[in-house]
Each structure stands twice: as C-alpha cells, then as structure tokens.
Amino acid sequence: MKSWILFAAIFFFGLPMIGLRHDARGLGAFSPVDRSSLAYAEELPPLPKGPLLLTGCTPEQQRAEYWISRLPNPDRVLKTPEQLKTLNDDIHSIVKECVDIFKLDLVRFGKSIRDQIELEFKTIRGRILFDVTGKRIPKTIFDDEIKPLIQTGNIPAKIKMKWGVATRATSVRALPIDMKMLEEIGDIEFDQLQFTLIKLWTPVGIFHTSKDGQWYYIQAPYVRGWVQSKDIALFAARDEIKKYAKSPKFLVVTGESVSVFSDPALTQILQRPSMGTVIPLIDQTTSAYKVWIPSRKADGQGALFKAYISRKSDVMNQFPAYTQRNVIKQAFKLLGARYGWGGMYNGRDCSGFTHDVFLSMGVDMPRDSDQQIFAGTQLGHYEPFKNSEEKIAALRSATPGFTILKMPMHMMIYLGEINGKFYVIHSTWAERISMTSDEKRRINQVVVSDLSLNGNSYLGSLFDRTVAISEVL
C-alpha cells in the first residue's frame, strides 16, 4: 500500500491523515504531466440511485422508525447538556487532534511549523502520483511550482499567530495547490492531497502564508493543513471570533444541509452549510431566522453581515436531546447522501458521516476515524478475523445509535441485531465481490447493510475486519 508512508510520517508528527484508502493497486508508467489537467472537466460515474437496497436488507429497514420502534425506550435522555460538556472535555483530553483554537499559544516557535511543512512536502513529493488525465506527475511540479509557494525560509523564529474563521465550507489540503494528485490512474474521486472539509464558522489559527498569498497554513479544530485564503476572514482579536463562534444563541443545522439567504424574502441563496454547522443567531421573525455570516473583505479582514434561514428549514436553536431516537433520525437524514473523500463533491466519507451525525447532537467528534473510536466508552479492541465471540458479545450489549464500529480506515454506526445479523448505517464507496480480483460494486453513498457485506471478497466481511467498538456515551 503506497499510502502508508505519508500516513506514518504525518501521523507521527501530529497531523491526522483523513480517510486514507485501503484498496491501493499497481501504478503505471511515467509520462510528463499536462498542465491543462488543472482545468480538466471531470466526468464522474453517475451516482447509483439510492437508497440502495443491499443484500440482506429489506425496504422497511431503510427507515429510521423501523430501528427506533425496536428500542425499549428510545426517548430516554442518555446525556444531559452538562454531561455532554464533560464528554467533550474527555474527548479533548484523550485525542490530541481535537485542538481548541481559543487555547492555542499566541506565539509559536517557527522551527516546528517549518519542519512540519517541509516533512509533508518531501513525503508527498516522494510518492508516485498521477493527474486526472492519467499522466504521472513529475517532480518538477513539486520543485518548480509548489516548493516556491511554501517559502519555509521566510518563516520567522517566532510566529505571531493570526486568527480567522471560515466564510464557507472549504477544503484543507496537504499542499497549497488545487491540482488533484491520484494514487491510481483514473481514480479521480480520491485526491491524495485532500484532508477534509471544514465548515462555515470554523475558527482557525494561521501559522504561515504562501508566497502568492492565496493559501494559509492553518490549524483547525480537527486538522492542520493548507486552505485557500479567499475562504478565511481575518480578525484582529481571537476573542472577537469566539464571541460569535461560541455564542449561546445559535442555530445548528440538523438537516443534510440548509439554504442561507442574503435577503429576508428568501430569494437569493448564499450557500448551503451542512449538518452539524453551528451559526450564531441574531433573532427571528415569523418567516426567517436572522443569523451572522462572516465575509472576507478585499484586504483579507473579516466583516459580519446579516443573512436569513427559513423557519421551515431543518435547524434547531439548541442541540437535539441526546436520545437514541434523535441520533438514529440524524443518521437516516443522510441515507443516500453522496460519498465524498475528505468532503469532496460536498459529500461525506465514512468518518465525515459519523462526524456530522454526532456533531449535530452536540458531540465534539474528531474528524479522523482513528481518533473517533476513542470518543466515549471503549467496548473492545480486536484483531481482524479474530475474536468473533467477543465482538458478538460487545454488539449485543451495545446501545444502538450511540455505538460506532471501526475497521481499518472505516467507520460505521450500529443499528441493532435481527435474526443473528448485525446491522449498521455507514458511508461507503464500494462493495468488493470477488475472492480473486479487485472487482467491486460501486455504492458511493450512505447505506444500511449488515456486517456480512464484503464477505464474498478476498478482503473479508465488515464483521471480520472490525477492530474496535465504542459507545459515544
């Protein structure tokens, strides 16, 4: 697997690698890169019409109420707001990637940032990667275009931190370039430079700026990397951001996404923030919520303007009660939603799905699958293809909805057991269906399945490859 080099280097130095693939294949021969590929018009395979009814599932199981009706007390509150705060504090203390931007040092030693940026650059430069036209990316792209941009020689001995906030959902990248770099020819849906997507109003600390001023090297609550500066509004004081980003008056997006409008008549859409986005609330009228949205002025400085969200939108002015009914309902609102590696195509990969579901419930869930499994109470850790009895016992004692299952680089939410089969809801790209080849069935969305999925392949079933089970309680 080619991904392991980058993963090992970045993870060791503290930057989570989001959504690494585990299905790497052979690589092709060298040919010079065509710079026109930057403007390449993608022709993605059509999204399979969903929700998909996978083997072993019934139409009734595609509804949240089916699973909720099986629970003895689905409306029992399992965590009060005060207990959720304690849970979040525990997550922050255990998972180093959960960085509180409002507690970062105001001054940072430049050497650690310079070393980090150079390590990431050298590691990715050393890989065999392809552009979207299938041509191998030459080292000159790194040496002549990317390296001059990162200008690590200009990082001072001590960095005086700058502070900003995302004006919309925006990608966090491994390098300051929007060119796709693929591990396999034709694998255009899996950009190896894509870490994740941070949401509207995400606060960030800014360490460094690219030479052309178009990229910031930032620390966000879940990830560190490069973001386009046009999507970050700067504020002179961090507390000014905190006043709004941590406002006690807010809306949380509880639907897959909602429309934000520039006018109270709700005719001009500005953007569509996704599930789990928290937006500071000003007040409300009979037809609309009035909210604050950050913007970036020509000089990069931030400003706030009033925007509007329909009162009919799927939003709440507090987090939903922490019940099995509500978490399962949140998960099923995403049934059929597009898979998207690191948030690409406004989709969600496996950990992006679990992240958004629990974020909308008020849990400060980490973004990376390797860190998510440490949220809450650990029910067990296992070796692949082993510990079957222990896994079964853990699942039968687990709380459906609040239980997450981890495979190597995959996350799922547990729904329950029916006739000896264990069911999950998860965002997945494909089902492998051969014992002798990499033949697969493209899924590319959030689906319900039982843990026997992939069992007719050389990789083994979801159950066989489950390595950890945890309750987010």
Image: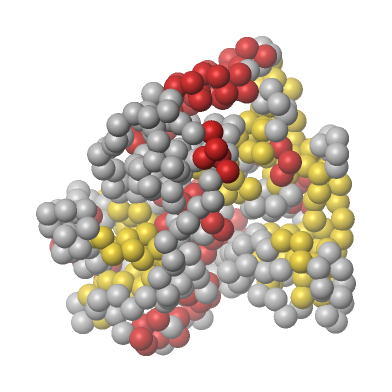
Q: In the image, is 200 to the left or to the right of 408?
A: right
Residue 190 rendering spot, x and y as whole percentages: 42, 47
Q: Residue at image x 60%, y 71%?
A: 255
Q: In the image, is 472 to the left or to the right of 270?
A: left
- Image quadrant where one finds the N terminus: top left
Q: In which quarter of the image is residue 402?
A: bottom left
Residue 456 rendering spot, x and y as whole percentages: 16, 64
- Image quadrant where one finds the C terminus: bottom left
Tell me if residue 71 can be seen: no
Vertical side of 454 occupied by 139: above or below: above
Q: How many labels does the image show?
A: 0
Q: Quadrant of residue 68?
A: bottom left
Image colouring: secondary structure
Residue 331 rendering spot, x and y as whole percentages: 48, 70
Front residue of 124 and 74: 124
The residue at the far left in this view is 436
Vertical side of 163 occupied by 449: above or below: below
Q: Residue at image x 30%, y 31%?
A: 29
Tell me if residue 254 can be seen: yes
Q: Residue at image x 70%, y 76%?
A: 313
